[in-house]
Image: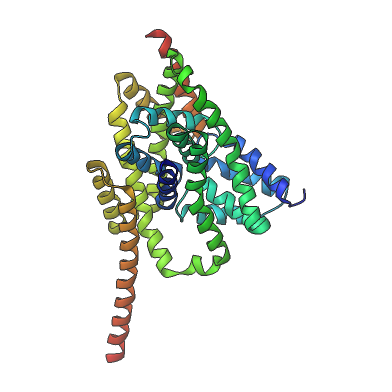
Amino acid sequence: MIFLKLFLEFFHIGLFSYGGGYATLPFLYHLVDKYGWYTTAQLTDMIAISSVTPGPLGVNVATFAGYVSAGILGAFIATVSILLPSIIIVVMISKLLEQFKNNRFVKSVIYSIKPAGCGLLAAVGVNMFLNNMSTSGVVLFLALFIVSLKYKRDPLIYLGVSAMVGFVLSFIK
Amino acid sequence: MEKNLYNIYKTFFKIGMLLLGGGYVILPLLQSELVEKRSWITGDEVAEYYALSQSIPGLIAANISIFTGYKLLGISGALAAIGGVITPAFLAIVVLARVLEEIIKYDFVQGIFWGVGIGVLVLIYLAVKEIWHKSVSDQYTFAIFFIVFLLSLCFKISPAWLVISAVLAGIILQVLKDKKLVEDEIEEDDK
């Protein structure tokens, strides 16, 4: 039953991804190996599209993955499923806001889970770098990397510049 | 503007349309739309919800929208806010998914995707750097970072197991701290 599987997988992603939209990526790469709903190449395209369309990246990729694997109903189920844990957790915390903020176990868990989220994301970055790199890719990455060290820019600038470089290069090749 | 479900949905729909290039862009949008234009919440509340949104699982933009919607009008407000923020995203992706097969044939589209892919890598690097500064502060947190990084890179292990392990590590750490505190107190009493 594809819809039940979509619900379970994306609910699970919403519950365990920690550290914002990119934190969903390790889970989405993991799904490639587990189900083959989409390929690694398709996922790379999805990430590119999600970065230039409105909305949180995690939601975009969920909608896309659901659509590719089971049409519009699949898209809807994946999107709602990835958000459902957030809705449950935030409503619960809103009711117990003061107790939550001051609980020492909550503090200790957050203190431990943050570096784990950082490690997962770093591993995804390294994997993406190793999987997709050509000479021109490395050059573009390093150029943007050096710019990012010197200036604090709006993230959209990096996407805009790199999209333009890709656009121009496609005519030169 | 009156705080009713329709207005909450509409306001968050607008925020959702402007939410380009990752969730953290939502912070200035909430500041201008909800704090400055409508005075629905205060700047301090936005900052508090942002901090809380980062300390729980899930997408940060989604979490902060739900917090704000709940504050405005309870559970139905929370649903109106999250519904509004994701409607533009959902429509954009469903439309694009339909035409993707067609447009991906063009070289220039592939070129743009390739370029954006590199841009995303830079953004991931920046996100790692930012989370690093906020999370890795001593040997314990560095050890967690490094172990999770290595296991995730070298094995096809589900990220959920690594996250659950980190949660357990946090609980064990606190139990050990509590125990040490009790022991120290007993020692104090003995003296």
Residue A91: which quarter of the image? Answer: bottom right
Q: Is residue B45 left or right of residue B5?
A: left
Residue at 57 percent across and 53 percent down: it is B47
Q: Is residue B149 left or right of residue B51?
A: left
Q: Residue furthest right?
A: B1
Q: Is residue A75 above or below residue B95?
A: below
Q: Nearer the viewer, residue B29 or B10?
A: B10
Q: Nearer the viewer, residue B24 or A54?
A: A54
Q: Is residue B124 above or below residue A105?
A: above
Residue at 34 percent across and 40 percent down: it is A31
Q: Position of residue B107 (x, y in %)?
A: 42, 13
Q: How is the image coloured?
A: rainbow
Q: Residue furthest left?
A: B154
Q: Is residue A81 left or right of residue A132?
A: right
Taking the image as drawn, is residue B191 in sight? no
Residue B174: which quarter of the image? Answer: bottom left
Quarter of the rendering occupied by the C terminus of chain A: top left
Number of marks in the image? 0
Q: Position of residue B184 (x, y in %)?
A: 30, 81
Q: Is residue B153 above or below residue B111?
A: below
Q: Position of residue A71 (x, y in %)?
A: 49, 33
Q: Residue furthest bottom?
A: B190
Taking the image as drawn, is residue B70 in sight? yes
Q: Position of residue B113 (x, y in %)?
A: 43, 23
Q: Residue furthest top?
A: A172
Q: Is residue A144 left or right of residue B60?
A: left
Residue at 67 percent across and 45 percent down: it is B9
Q: Nearer the viewer, residue B140 or A29?
A: A29
Quarter of the rendering occupied by the N terminus of chain A: top left
